Image (cartoon, rainbow, N blue to C red):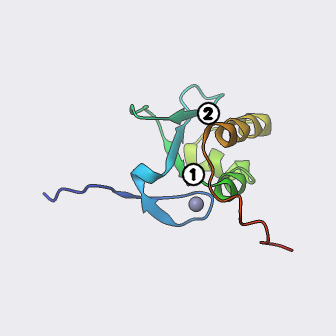
Amino acid sequence: MKNIKAPLRTCIGCRSKFPQNTLIRFVCRTGDALEMQELKKLPGRGAYVCRSKSCIENAFKVPKRINTLLRVQLSESVFTEFKQALLEKEIIADEKKETASS
Ligand SMILES: [Zn+2]
């Protein structure tokens, strides 16, 4: 058995793979709300997203994708609220990429 330090997980915002410990993980435990996973492990299916504003925006743009991934049926307002909470809580470091689509 090899000692794997940081398994790669796919960010649902940019679809790229990153070490698990650099991503935000969130889960749906109750069936009607999302929770961010900090250090402790939460049970249930989880999804990962980069600590980047563009990835968070992108990840929650298509709620259906997350519903499919987590096998839940959450409403759009749940995603909107959770996205806001993430953006406020996380220190997002890519504010300077403002010229992306102009
Ligand atoms: Zn990403």
Spot occupied by residue 81 in the image (x, y as percentages of width and height) = 74, 34
Residue 15 position by quadrant: bottom right
Residue for badge 2: 34
Spot occupied by residue 51 in the image (x, y as percentages of width and height) = 57, 51
Direction from residue 92 to residue 8 in the image, left or right: left
Q: Write down which quadrant ligand 1 falls in.
A: bottom right
Q: Earlier in the sequence, mark 2 or mark 1?
A: 2
Report the residue at 63% width, 37% height from top: 89
Query: Which kind of residue does numbered mark 1 sit on?
Result: Arg
The total number of labels drawn is 2
Q: Which residue ends up furthest to the front in the rendered image?
A: 96
Direction from residue 1 to residue 34 in the image, left or right: right
Report the residue at 71% width, 63% height from top: 96
Spot occupied by residue 24 in the image (x, y as percentages of width and height) = 52, 46
Residue for badge 1: 51
Mark in the foreground, 2 or 1:
1
From the viewer's side, name the closer residue of 101 and 27: 101
Query: Which kind of residue does numbered mark 2 sit on?
Result: Leu
Q: What is the CA distance from the residue labelled 2 to the residue labelled 1?
A: 17 Å
Q: Which residue ends up furthest to the top in the rendered image?
A: 30
Spot occupied by residue 14 in the image (x, y as percentages of width and height) = 61, 64
